Amino acid sequence: MNDDLTVPELQRRLAEFAAARNWQPFHTPKNLASALSVEAGELLEIFQWLTPEQAATVMTDPDTAHRVRDEVADVLAYLLQLCTVLEVDPLRALAEKIERNESRFPAA
């Protein structure tokens, strides 16, 4: 695995993966947003009935940690694919949102 991964490189790999399987017709904004929501729900399901203390140590169990990493990957994959389709730069969008939040919620 490459430790120098970039968002554009991951987006390219996801696009190539989908293209090789002729999945592009299904990668509409609505479908990708729906899939993103489903995967986020699957991530939440791991934590659903845990106490805050249990949730804080979820990565100590190898099987659960693997599930968490897989669901995080699924959420990120769909988010990056949605950004590609909508031509949103996710890093720029986040940086702009942080700046707005810093203005809206100044530190004491």
Image (spheres, rainbow, N blue to C red):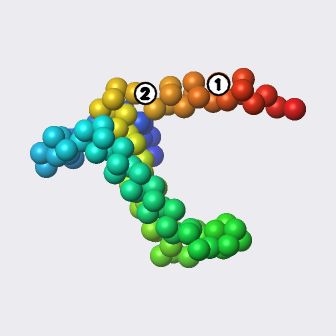
Query: Where residue 96 appears, x then y in whole percent?
Result: 57, 24
| Mark 2 or 1, closer to the camera | 1
Please tell me whether mark 1 sits on a helix, a strand or a loop: helix
Query: Where residue 2 appears, x then y in whole percent?
Result: 39, 47
Q: Residue drawn at (33%, 29%), measured in percent from left and top?
A: 86
Can residue 2 be seen from the camera position used here? no
Left/right of residue 63 with respect to residue 35 in the rendered view: right
Query: Quadrant of the image for the C terminus?
Result: top right
Can residue 84 be seen from the camera position used here? yes
Amino acid identity at mark 1: Arg
The answer to whether 71 is drawn above or below residue 96 in the figure is below
Q: Residue drawn at (34%, 51%), measured in percent from left and top?
A: 35
Amino acid identity at mark 2: Asp
Question: Which residue, given by chain and number where applicable, does mark 2 sit on?
Answer: 89
Question: Which residue, given by chain and number where applicable, does mark 1 sit on?
Answer: 100
The answer to whether 73 is drawn above or below residue 31 in the figure is below
Q: Quadrant of residue 102?
A: top right
Q: Earlier in the sequence, mark 2 or mark 1?
A: 2
Closer to the camera in the image, 106 or 20: 106
Q: Residue drawn at (75%, 30%), measured in percent from left and top?
A: 105
